[in-house]
Image (cartoon, helix red, strand yellow):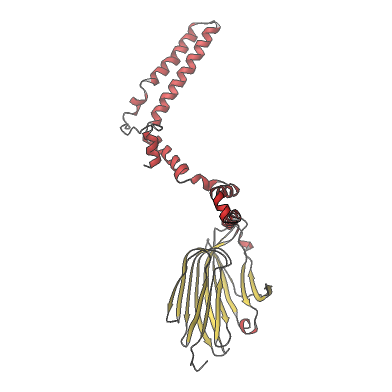
Amino acid sequence: MSVITNWIQENKFMPQPKNNINKTSWFKHIFINYFWVGLVIILLSIVIDSCYSAHPFWLDVIVKTLEAVGISVLVASIFTFASGTSEFVNKIQNLLQDIIIHRNFLSNIDSESKRQALAALIKPNELERQNYANLEDYYDSFINKTLDITKKCVRSDYAINARVFNDIEKCALGVTQDISYRVHPTKAGYDNINLKFLDSEDLSKHSFCEYIAISSTGGGRKVYNQFELNDSSQGGEHWKEITIKLDEFGLNYSHLNIDMRVTEYGHGHWIPIGWRAGQPTDGFSYYLRCEEGIKIKNVMTFISGAKFYINNKNNTEIHITSHQWFNEGTGVSIIASIVEGNPDN
């Protein structure tokens, strides 16, 4: 039993449960004392009313008063019995725990009310305002970013299984990545899948996507293996982009499972391998293996809001994992190259 419930019971704000009341004796406990008093008062008012065919005003007042008092005593006796049972006490206890301890009622209020509640909760005091300029604006931006997650398609169980190889025919290193993740919709549905290749002659001329498969919760699966590359640019960067629209799935599914296989090529004897989260993501696993004669030269992680763990085995295999939510902008950058002294270098 919670501390609050104990305090309430100790201060006699809540009746103690009558655990000694069993199924065979509950009638006995109801039909005693005030129950009978109330019943007698009601019957008395009925007798008085029926004994006089024409009664004066003062007698009407007495009859109505007796009826009201009798009904009140009768209802109060039944409520007193019910309030003393363990079921009633447990019900009140659970309600108090939800409101005072767990504060579950906060989860059922609308988004704007949640925003106001959070702003009131973490509002800086006067000393904090003096020491930190615009601290309240920082809190507001944090609240907005947190609550706006419902407007974004979030992902979970993001996994990449990659293999770096030396393509003798193309005279370049390549990496094939098997990517899988689960995406959850917003209130408006699913965002499109956008796959980008840097628009550089030696980087993108051989890069390609083998397939993108979309599996629904009902067991359906749709596979795309022919794509149209569109030119796109932002901030001075240019890339080729593949777009898969998910409008047809709408809000018919609680989530979709995405699988794809992508192969990219680097600059001759070395290759940059990068991944960046474009959406809030829950959980990430990146496994990369280099074929013989190739080693990992550099690894960098750009962490935003989570912890990453790196297991590097002799610079030929690397496993990067995170088991937390992380924000957009989080990413991984790896450079692999042919081992010095290799005849293919």
Q: Is residue 86 visible?
A: yes
From the viewer's perspective, is 37 left or right of 24?
A: right
Q: Where 34 falls versus 17 (above or below)?
A: above
Q: Residue 296 at what x, y percent from top left? A: 48, 82
Q: Residue 124 at what x, y percent from top left? A: 55, 51
From the viewer's perspective, is 118 left or right of 14?
A: right
Judging depth in this view, the residue of 123 and 249 nearest the camera is 123
Q: Where 163 falls versus 141 (above or below)?
A: below
Q: Quadrant of residue 145?
A: bottom right
* Residue closest to the far bottom: 343
Q: Residue 48 at what x, y percent from top left? A: 47, 9
Q: Residue 308 at what x, y percent from top left? A: 47, 69
Residue at image position (51%, 44%) is 105
Q: Is residue 123 visible?
A: no
From the viewer's perspective, is 121 left or right of 247?
A: left
Q: Quadrant of residue 29?
A: top left
